[in-house]
Image (cartoon, rainbow, N blue to C red):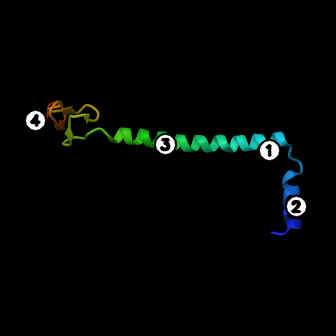
Amino acid sequence: MGTARFDELTKTLASGTSRRSMLKSIAIVATGGVVALFGGRSAEAQHKKKDQCAHDGDPCGRGVTCCGNLICSDPTNGGVCFKPGKKK
């Protein structure tokens, strides 16, 4: 890019925009980036948290809980999730 073209570009960007306005815009963009970065991770973590419970017939116990109203047959030593009233 030639110097004349660069000067023209910088004049176009600078015209009509105060330093305060430019700093505000930069702060808004930076804040949006931070929110998007951390907001996305927390949503992903919430999704993973929901999937960490065991479903009917899945192993449970030893830190793994059963989903919803399912019961673990042996939560201490590790068992299987089942519906109440259903034979183990």
Q: Nearer the viewer, residue 58 or 61?
A: 61
Q: Which mark is residue 87?
A: 4
> Nearer the observer, disc 2 or disc 3?
2
- Residue pointed to by mark 3: 41
> Nearer the observer, disc 4 or disc 1?
1
Instruction: Find numbered disc 3 in the image and state the secondary structure of the residue it sits on.
Output: helix
Q: Which mark is residue 22?
A: 1
Residue name at image x 18 percent, y 31 percent: 75
Which numbered disc, 3 or 1, marks the residue that appears first in the sequence?
A: 1
Residue name at image x 68 percent, y 45 percent: 29
Mark 4 touches mark 1? (CB < 8 Å): no
Q: Amino acid at mark 4?
A: Lys
Q: Amino acid at mark 2?
A: Asp
Q: Whole-Å distance between the Cαs marked 2 and 1?
A: 18 Å
Q: Position of residue 48 (x, y in %)?
A: 38, 42
- Residue pointed to by mark 2: 7
Q: Nearer the viewer, residue 38 or 7?
A: 7
Residue name at image x 36 percent, y 38 percent: 50
